[in-house]
Amino acid sequence: MELEVKYRKIIHVDMDAFYASVEQMDNPELKGKPLAVGGSEVRGVVSAASYEARKFGVRSAMSGIQAKRNCPELIFVRPRFDRYKEISNKIRKIFHDYTDLVEPLSLDEAYLDVTQNKKGNPSATLIAQEIRKRIFEEVGLTASAGISVNKFVAKIASDYNKPNGQKTVNPDEVEDFLEKLDIKKFYGIGKVTTEKMYHHGIFTGKDLKSKTKEYLEQHFGKSGGFYYNIVRGIHNSEVKPNRISKSVAAEHTFNENLTSEIFMQERLERIAAELEKRLKKYNISGKTVTLKIKYSDFTTQTRSKTLPYFISDKGLLFETAKELLYQERMKDSVRLLGISLNNLNTEIKKTVVVQLRFEF
């Protein structure tokens, strides 16, 4: 007698070059041209790049100066977050026509659990196709999607046929799919960990799978157990519709680099006031204050302090950030300062998800 295998049906929808695509949609003169949202050829950092710009190596988080070097014809556009949020809300309404189990990761991507869905459609693949078609027809933008048994595989799959494509990884294909994958394609494994894995002879999922759990924990610490599981398709994180932020932050990039702590202190006071507004809007407080410092060479440093009580007041935020500012000397001039608060007073409520057998 065969045991019934139970799986979730998870879709990860990722908009294609979202900010840049919105700008090209709203201004037809920008269509087909290399475009960067945010930054400038003198200052700032690229928030998003159109596919035309990406061909020249322009990427998000790249300095405006470097982006212009890579692509002399690059057009810079100031971000319009209110507009992006407006479009994002329209897209989320489409998602909710299919399921209430929608977990937004940002304005341009979300997980959907369609194991049981409002359309009664047993095929997650067909649901993803329909959602992408509706986004194009009703909003005017293209989206890509990944479909699989868990969030981890669905996230990787959504990047597989970008832009304007989708990929389904069926339950019996998961391990083979992950074994053939370059380790740098694994979601959550960044550049530093990738280099470390290369050093240990781990270049593909198959290489990772050949290592014992003990070996991975010995060389990668607590993350070793996570790597051991994900390469075997084990990832039980649920789609959480009411995803609670782990931190709240405010930061500012300066027009000119700052070299004096006195000037930095003045900016931190304003940033603390902005952070207080955000915290009070959602009635959030926290215990751990983190100061973020980005230097003129684009290296980033963080300094943190955990208090014995919850705070949200701008005065306490500022005083703690100021203490962290003077904790050690600055190694260079500063282009960005930020304050974040985590270890929040929010509680994450776990929900029980029923897993059913299904067809992809």
Image (spheres, grey):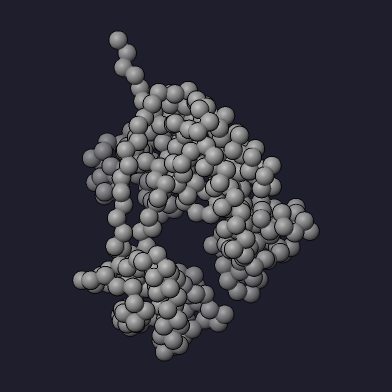
Is the residue 221 above or below the residue 251 in the image? above
Q: In which quarter of the image is residue 302?
A: bottom left
Q: Residue furthest left?
A: 308
Can residue 151 be seen?
yes
Residue at 57% over, 80% down: 255
Considering the image in quadrants, where does the N terminus appear?
top left
Q: Residue at x 23, y 71 (%)?
A: 309
User: Is residue 173 found left or right of 346 in the rendered image?
Assistant: right
Question: What is the x, y in percent for residue 26?
Answer: 72, 57
In the rendered image, residue 78, in percent from the top left (x then y), is placed at 64, 68
x and y, in percent, of residue 144 in the image: 59, 41
Along the viewing direction, whichever of 250 and 180 lies nearer the viewer = 250
Q: Say whether residue 206 is visible.
A: no
- Quarter assignment of residue 276: bottom left
Q: In this view, does 210 lie above or below 330?
A: above
- 325 relative to 239, above or below: below
Q: Nearer the viewer, residue 219 or 187?
A: 187
254 relative to 219, above or below:
below
Q: Residue at x 74, y 63 (%)?
A: 73
Instruction: Identify the residue at the far top of this view.
Output: 1
